Amino acid sequence: MNSINISSHNNNNPGVYNVNSESGLLEFNKEFRSKEKLPCYVFKYPDQASRFISNEIITSIKQAESEGRPFVLALSAGSTPTTVYDVLIKLYNDKLVSFKNVITFNIDEYYSIPRTRIQSYYRFMKENLFQYIDIPEKNINFLNSEIDSESVDRHCEEYEEKIKAVGGIDMLLLPIGKRIGFNEAGTTKNTTTRLVDIEQNTRIDAASDFFGTEHVPHQALTMGIQTFLSCKRVILVAFSEGKAAIVQKTCEGEVTTSVPPSCFQKHANCQLVIDEAAATEITRVKAPWTIHGTNAPIVIKWSPILARKAVIWLSLKLNKPILKLEEEEYHDNNLSSLLKTYGPCPNLNLKVFRYLQSTINGWPGGRPVQSPPKTPQGFGLGPLPVQVQNDQWDSTTTTAQPIPKRVIVFSPHPDDDVISMGGTFIRLCDQGHEVHVAYQTSGNIAVWDDDAKRFANFAADFCKLFQFDDGAKEKSLKIQNSVENFIQNKEPGQPDSREIQLIKGLIRQTEARAGARYAGVRNDRIHFLDLPFYETGAVKKKPLGQEDIDIMVKFLESVKPEIIFAAGDLSDPHGTHRVCLKAILAAIERLKDQKWMQDCQVWLYRGAWQEWEPERIEMAVPMSPHELTRKRMSIFKHQSQKDVPAFPGTDKREFWMRAEDRNRTTAKIYDRLGLTEFEAMEAFVSWSIDNKFGTNPI
């Protein structure tokens, strides 16, 4: 499968770094890292970061071999290190490394659960790494989740003793978050391996793994902070936008027990390895102009997106509309070089204002009549300086013709369409476009067991009420009894039977149909792709396979869309959005030589977790109060996800509340910047099919 890029065509020249074309490392001048208290390596995409980490591990393994000693590696389970394990397995298969001389210690484990359970970290490591490499079984060390409570303390002491007996841990690979291992905020640095209580928010975060918070264990075994700090080398890892805040605190904040990973600032050999999305809050990426050089001013090579970012930052900081910003305010906030590049001040203000104004689009499929062309002039200011003309300042807009257009809205789960872009979805239908919606997965794990029982009971009573033949009534009753018996005897975290998976999938499907119909989509344009990677019945999914890509290709060929909307929100906790986007882009890559695909526009939306940054937005679709209410009603059609969804996360608001708050916040930002005031807005960035800017985003 070829690598393809998801970055917007306007968003790839940040002006403060170069991208190493071979490794994907974002190369910053030393001055830009002056606020960072840890060596921080930022890569464009997670797979590039994973290759770097894997190469560091392999180099260290070979170094230890040359010294005639084993290499001791501490590992963890979870989605973040999985990409590293995939690379290590490939390198082993290519005969570039052997693990016969490697000793591993896993850092944590739930207590107490059987090692055979799908949630067990023991099982995770076996299925994601150890069964594919040549590491001797005797060299693999785990904390024992099955040990009796009387022996736990001694077991933890012996784990520490075993680490010391092999000479200590040479390298620790540690994903970071609000906790490290199961060391929650407040953990002191003198802690070692021990049994700990799991905080409620952590249990809520793990609810989807266990099919409900009530099934998540209340305790865990974990290495302590002191154990981590005693490792000879530490590689901290974080991927995706959702980790940006903790990355900033770890890298630039104070050392505090409220941010456990910040303790590594005191480690003599620790590196933080992240992707570009996780770097969005560190100063060199978020606001590099605020960094002051030691001997001379920081030199920034300004680009349109970085200029927009700085002007928006200044406007929001001063709480002044963009067109009211004054020259002195730029100078007072270390932005003199921006004025030298794109000034004078009124022209720069107008340029950014015009860009944001151009993103507001009430016709997301294109207007029936072409709008007058935009010019880089206005308000009697005369032409702008030569250097700012034709410099990627204009936002991407939908083409006017033809009308109506063939549109596909891809929805990873059966409610992402209306939650993330319900207002745009409704508007596309109202404006007469041929709108198709394609639900990529069934979403069947996110349905309560009680709902499955209720619908099985409904089906049996339905057959009886309308006097179906005896065979149908008998079969429906048999299914009802089977469902009830399975659920009654179901072990915590046990995957559903195939019957229950189908019923739960049908519940999500009927809700999705109702939501799409309410938005205005015809029945024959509602599609359920049921990509095979998802249909495991468990939270752990299969890798994206060729059969998934084939389904996507066949569907795209059947519609030949002129506009595609897809989920670009990669912060989805369990990665379904990420995999679904990868499937779409892989299918586009295969079809990119087709004329209709070359003419196709691709827009990325974000979901329930966060919105695009204002400087990156290329289309903002406004909503009136009435349109926002219509969006809410389409979300309400997803009854199984309303009130208390199966896996709500730590945000206790319902999805419609999260969506409305996000949409209102976007509109409020535009209002504060001095643009038209709307009730709410949905935001999008474009993706360019020409593969001009990069490599694999996933």
Image: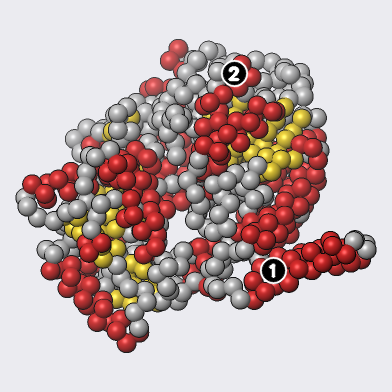
- Few, some or many residues within 10 Å of mark 1 (<14, 14–19, 20+): many
Label 1–label 2 contact, CB within 8 A: no
Q: Amino acid at mark 1?
A: Val
Q: Amino acid at mark 2?
A: Gln
Seen at 54% across and 72% down, the residue is 492
Q: Position of residue 387 (x, y in %)?
A: 43, 15
Q: Residue furthest left?
A: 67
Side of 662 where 615 appears, left or right:
left
Residue 594: assigned label: 2
Q: Comparing marks 1 and 2, which lies closer to the viewer? A: 1
Colour mapping used in the image = secondary structure
Seen at 55% across and 18% down, the residue is 593
Residue 87 visible at all: yes
Q: Residue furthest bottom?
A: 150
- Is the N terminus in the top left, top right, bottom left or bottom right quadrant? top left
Seen at 24% across and 55% down, the residue is 135
Q: Position of residue 655 (x, y in %)?
A: 64, 56
Side of 667 where 474 appears, left or right:
right
* Viewer-nearest residue: 690 or 332: 690
Side of 146 where 580 appears, left or right:
right
Tell me the SS state at disc 1.
helix
Q: Earlier in the sequence, mark 1 or mark 2?
A: 1
Q: Quadrant of residue 221?
A: bottom left
Residue 504 visible at all: no
The alpha-carbon separation of the residues under discs 1 and 2 comes to 47 Å
- Few, some or many residues within 10 Å of mark 2 (<14, 14–19, 20+): few
Q: Quadrant of residue 331?
A: top left
Q: Position of residue 379 (x, y in %)?
A: 61, 20
Q: Residue 660, relative to residue 356: is it above or below?
A: below
* Viewer-nearest residue: 207 or 42: 207
The residue to which callout 1 is attached is 483
